[in-house]
Amino acid sequence: MSAALQIPEADALFQAVTAEGYALLRGGPLAARLGLSGPELDAFAGSWARLETDRFMADGGLYRRRRHANFTAAWGQPGHRRNPHRPHFQAVVHNSLNGGVERWFAPVEDAVAAGAPLQAMLDLGRSVADAGSPGHDWFVEMHQFRIEAAAHMPGYPTPEGVHHDGVDYVLISMIARTNLAGGETLITDDDQRELARFTLLDRLDTAFVDDVRVMHGVTPVEPADPALPSCRDVLVLTWKRI
């Protein structure tokens, strides 16, 4: 496993992803590099308390809450333009559990979508996408996930198992771990041979993945203290060439 990048400049991030198919960024240096303040990040993280239950889980589970948004990033133009709300769709080949259906999730709140933390993370990820595939426009999706767990009722961050998302690039950023055990991130090749295993622990600890080259997944989570509430909050951003 490669060492985490301590100064995640865009070119260093791109080089790591190009070399290994993924990169791991630690949250403290990343927040400083992006110029994000504590109050901005606190407000951003607080929005995870307002997610809605995912009613599309084919396993019948009610352990996942989420919101969703989509954007377009045009080559040669700065920023990401938010598009009208639409369903999230994955082919069965990419999501054997929940694929093949249009899934309508609650929209990301306007203030969250326009806020500095999200915009900074979008710009960071786009810098790698543009470097890897110059000249392309991008369809970008944002997912806010909360996975809840209770005593004798584990939560499953990736219930479909280790997988491709069917996009070009994936950014997975830790927002909060509350009374949590488990939740290791796995990176594998297409034969599911393990390439890396690490845990996103601190706020903005981030994995950036070349989804075409490698697969990713997360192990189940459970409460560290069975008597207390437990959850795992993450931000997921994806870029797909248009």
Image: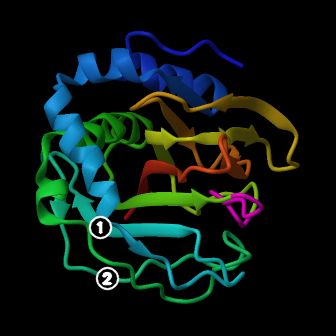
Q: Mark 1 points at which residue?
A: 70
Residue at the image point whose x is 72% and y is 64% from the top: 153
Q: Which amino acid does label 1 sit on?
A: Asn
Indicate the quadrant where residue 35 lies. Answer: top left
Q: Mark 2 points at which residue?
A: 86
Is residue 153 within the magenta segment?
yes
Question: Can you say whether 95 is above or below 218 in the image?
Answer: below
Tell whether 94 sits left or right of 52. right
Q: Extreme front residue here?
A: 227
Q: What residue type is labelled 2?
A: Arg
User: 37 or 196, which is in the foreground?
Assistant: 37
Indicate the quadrant where residue 97 lies. Answer: bottom right
- The quadrant of the rendering that contains the N terminus is top right
Is residue 92 within the magenta segment?
no
User: 12 or 198, which is in the foreground?
Assistant: 198
- Tell how many labels: 2
Residue at the image point whose x is 15% and y is 36% from the top: 40
Looking at the image, is mark 2 or mark 1 earlier in the sequence?
1
Please name the predominant secondary structure of the magenta segment in the image: loop
| SS type, badge 1 | strand
Question: Can you say whether 84 is above or below 187 in the image?
Answer: below
User: Which residues are drawn in magenta?
Assistant: 151-160
Whether label 2 touches label 1, CB < 8 Å: yes
Residue at the image point whose x is 72% and y is 66% from the top: 160
User: 214 or 120, which is in the foreground?
Assistant: 120
Q: How far apart are marks 2 and 1 (CA)?
A: 8 Å
Q: Is residue 36 visible?
A: no
Residue 106, horizontal then vertical, whole percent: 32, 78
Q: Residue 113 carries which label?
A: none
